[in-house]
Amino acid sequence: MKFSSKSWLALVFIIVFAGVYFGLRWQDNVLPSMPAEKAGLIKATSPLPNQKITSPLLISGEARGYWFFEASFPAKLLDEDGSQLAVMPVQAQGEWMTENFVPFRAKLIFPKPKGKQGILILQKDNPSGLPEHDDELRIPVRF
């Protein structure tokens, strides 16, 4: 069976179209499987990096007790332009005055963002204000 040049062109078009279509669908539906973490300090199990999020957002994971101050640390959600959408304290779910890992949890409510991407920042609480005590875990998210 011989194909004409029009048949080949149509076949190439169909293959390219299908590849682009299914590639974009796959990208939108793939959920990351690895938690965001700063080794030995904090691990966020929700949301996962590059996960599509909506409001309210459940934030959970575990952090060393010294990541907290008075049983909490701040979380900030920024849009793709760096504008702050929300900020709130994340609460320890156990005894935080320890060097061990302590579970944390929060529900973050935020307005509809303009873009499709953002960043969730889990900041080590630093009541001293000294820059050498600053630390954070940045988690890329999608809206």
Image (cartoon, rainbow, N blue to C red):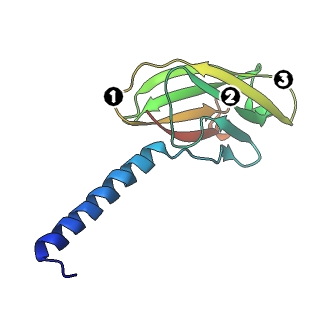
Which label belongs to residue 94? 3
The type of residue carrying mark 2 is Asp
For the image shown, how many numbered marks are present on the structure? 3
For label 3, the crowd category at 10 Å Cα-Cα, with few meaning under 14, some 14 to 19 and many 20 or more, is: few
Query: Percent x, y for residue 92?
Result: 76, 23
Image vertical order of residue 15 relative to residue 94, above or below: below
Which residue is at the front of the view, 104 or 121? 104
Does dot 3 land on a helix, a strand or a loop? loop
Which label belongs to residue 125? 2
Does dot 2 land on a helix, a strand or a loop? loop
For label 2, the crowd category at 10 Å Cα-Cα, with few meaning under 14, some 14 to 19 and many 20 or more, is: many
Q: Quadrant of residue 23?
A: bottom left
Residue at image position (34%, 59%) is: 19
For label 1, the crowd category at 10 Å Cα-Cα, with few meaning under 14, some 14 to 19 and many 20 or more, is: few
Distance from the alpha carbon under mark 1 to that under mark 2: 29 Å
- Is the C-beta separation of discs 2 and 3 under 8 Å? no
Does dot 1 land on a helix, a strand or a loop? loop
Residue corresponding to mark 1 = 114
Nearer the N terminus, badge 2 or badge 3? 3
The type of residue carrying mark 3 is Gly
Image vertical order of residue 60 relative to residue 39, above or below: above
The type of residue carrying mark 1 is Lys
